Amino acid sequence: MKLTLDVENTVTERDGKMHLDPFESGNSLTMVGMLSDTGEERIVTFDHSEVEPDLNGHDTVQEWLDKATVLIGHNIAYDLVWLWESGFKYDGAVFDTMLAEYVIQRGVKLPLSLEQCAERYELETKKQDTLKAYFKAGYSTRNIPHDELSDYLSADLHATQQLSDKLNIKLNTKEHSSLMNTVILTNELSVCLAKIYQRGMAVDLKGLDTVRQEFQTEKSNLLTDLDKHVKNLMGDTPINLNSPEQLGWVIYGRKVLDKTEWANRIDPYMSDSDFRTAINIGTEQLYKTKAVQCPDCEGKGFVHKIKKNGTPYAKATSCKTCNKLGYLFRPTEEKAGLRFKPPTPKWASANGFSTSKANLALLQSAAKSKGMDDASDFLGKVIRLSALDTYLSSFVEGIQTYTKEDGKLHVSLMQHRTSTGRLSGANPNMQNMPRGGTFPVKRVFVSRFENGKIMEADFAQLEFRVAAFLSQDGVAIEEVKTGFDVHSYTAQVISDAGQKTNRQEAKAHTFAPLYGATGFGRTAAEATYYEHFNEKYKGVSLWHSRLAKEAVTTQKIKTPSGREFSFPDISRRANGSVSHFTMIKNYPVQSFATADIVPIVLLHIEKYLANMKSCIVNSVHDSLVIDIHPEEEKQVLYIINETNKELPNLIKLRWGIEFNVPLLLESKIGKNWLDTKDVS
């Protein structure tokens, strides 16, 4: 039986966030709706204020699940976790209509809600909107009128079933049949990700408080140092570094005269000479200031006005001369700011000039190469301050908020958020953690087992190896086989070009050209490496050209796994270049590496851990995180080592591909996710 299923559950608001999961105290399963492929429908009530729970409800739902040959749902992982946590069993095949539609879209993002899919496919049954008023008014599902909730659930079931039929017909046409393998893998992975979500990662909340304090102390010290920098660069002018406009004053030393005129004057594609003219006309040079006491209020910020009879008003009024500050800022003759010049019109913004993280990093590289130590120090600290704010809000507070009473952060991994199929996360998104092994937040993730350990099995240079395979670049393949240190080589090229660079700093540049990055806007030494990359890896450059031709000719590109990406509005420009070229370079590498190879390895290891206590608890980019039971460390290591031997065969079995570039999972084990050591 093909069984379409949907659940309704209560939702809890806590710490300003909505918690929809079964791990949140107070949440409960309200209803389960089921629709068979023969049209038989059953809605079972478990927790509703108007009706008694169905006494045979659990047995009824389990009986239908036992008969199911495939379970159909829209975001089926959500339904599975609720079923499992409510005591139901299901370990069969699934078909997720949301994920199937996502694959068919080929990287072109269209809305994926059931309502919007139903409208797009012109289904007979549309998703009902009757409950929006109830939810807006703060009703719980258990308090919405039972009949209305049942009708709502029934409409969802029929819409999902009809959408499933439409998608399966589509996937069996000549145009879309090549995507079937990707849909199958996506559905298999959805079950694995649901299990990872159900397990969660154990969190050391005391350790989290320590990390918070470390970040806050570092932030406080940074602010003190930055205040000194700003004082030196701007005089007494008050600057809020959280304001992109005011940060721009410090970096560029110029201020927009009229924002409306500036916006009308600036064009990202204007010539450099016109851009310089616009800067001269539309902005003014800033000068350092010196604060002096306001003569009108004598530094008080307010004044007592005098009545006609000579007596003062009882209530003081704000001083308009100094705007309540008590002092005025007199410009000196010394120019303010770092006085960087924005290199292109694309650096212009509504408030002046860009202060994006990427552009600040470019300016810092330029400052380093020119020996501008103070400027480099200031920019580095501004970048770090922004990072700390993100770490505190997104990670520290996010982990605190979403860690449940069971002491675990239930890791949400989704396949449908990125254009390439690469996993994304939420609550918080741990895919956004800084790369490398120094991020303190990772220390708070520990084993659920007494004396247990955390393993991270990380693919070595996966995307570079995938690019070497896809392009069949002889130099790249040989470097992988011989273990050539590409990062040290990058550092050498940049250093030889006149910019002293170490291996760690060079990592940011080594593989950047794979994803469309160029030397444009970078220092001369860094630009030298980007040019060198294309000369060194000529096979990669030629492959990029073939991809561009394929995209222009067919309006799509296809990877060896069968996954496809559509470029309906692609064009070749007069100079021979192709629009969307960065995506054309990036999508095949990122998708085949992290949306295809990583998932089949996840599934492979998940299968071998099935009868063990150790379990996969997370996946970040090209790594797997495993919580190891103290009695199973050798077994888990054995599984990883055997998987390494099986990697080429796993790819061949899944897609019939002879992968002729070595792949390697490197393992690290420790008492927490951060403090791990390499193991052979």
Image: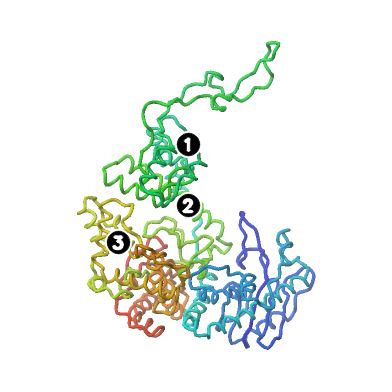
Relative to 245, say whether 160 is above or below. below
Q: Is residue 66 left or right of residue 299?
A: right
**Amino acid marked by disc 2:** Thr
User: What residue occupies the far front of the structure in this picture?
Assistant: 574
Q: Which mark's residue is nearer the viewer, 3 or 2?
A: 3
Q: Could you tell me which quadrant the N terminus lies in? A: bottom right
Viewed as shown, does residue 188 lie left or right of 576? right
**Label 2 or label 1, whichever comes before in sequence order:** 1
Amino acid under label 1? Answer: Leu
Q: Whole-percent x and y of residue 381?
A: 38, 44
Q: Which residue is mark 1?
A: 257
At 47% across and 33% down in the image, what residue appears? 238
Question: On screen, 78 above or below 522?
Answer: below
Query: Taking 19 as reference, is 29 above or below it?
Result: below
The x, y position of residue 317, in whole percent, is 64, 24
Give whichever of discs 3 and 2 has the lower sequence position: 2
Q: Nearer the viewer, mark 2 or mark 1?
A: 1
| Mark 1 or mark 3, whichever is nearer to me | 1
Percent position of residue 44, x then y = 72, 78
- Residue density around tag 1, few if under 14, some if 14–19, many if 20 or more, within 10 Å: some
Q: Residue furthest right?
A: 50
Q: Residue at x 29, y 46 (%)?
A: 368
State the residue at coordinates (39%, 50%): 359
* Disc 2 target residue: 390
Element at label 3: helix
Q: Which residue occupies 27% across, 64% down?
A: 534
Query: Identity of the amino acid at label 3?
Result: Thr
State the SS at label 2: helix
What separation in Å lies between label 1 and label 3 (alpha carbons)? 41 Å
Looking at the rendering, which quadrant does residue 564 occupy?
bottom left
Q: Which residue is mark 3?
A: 510
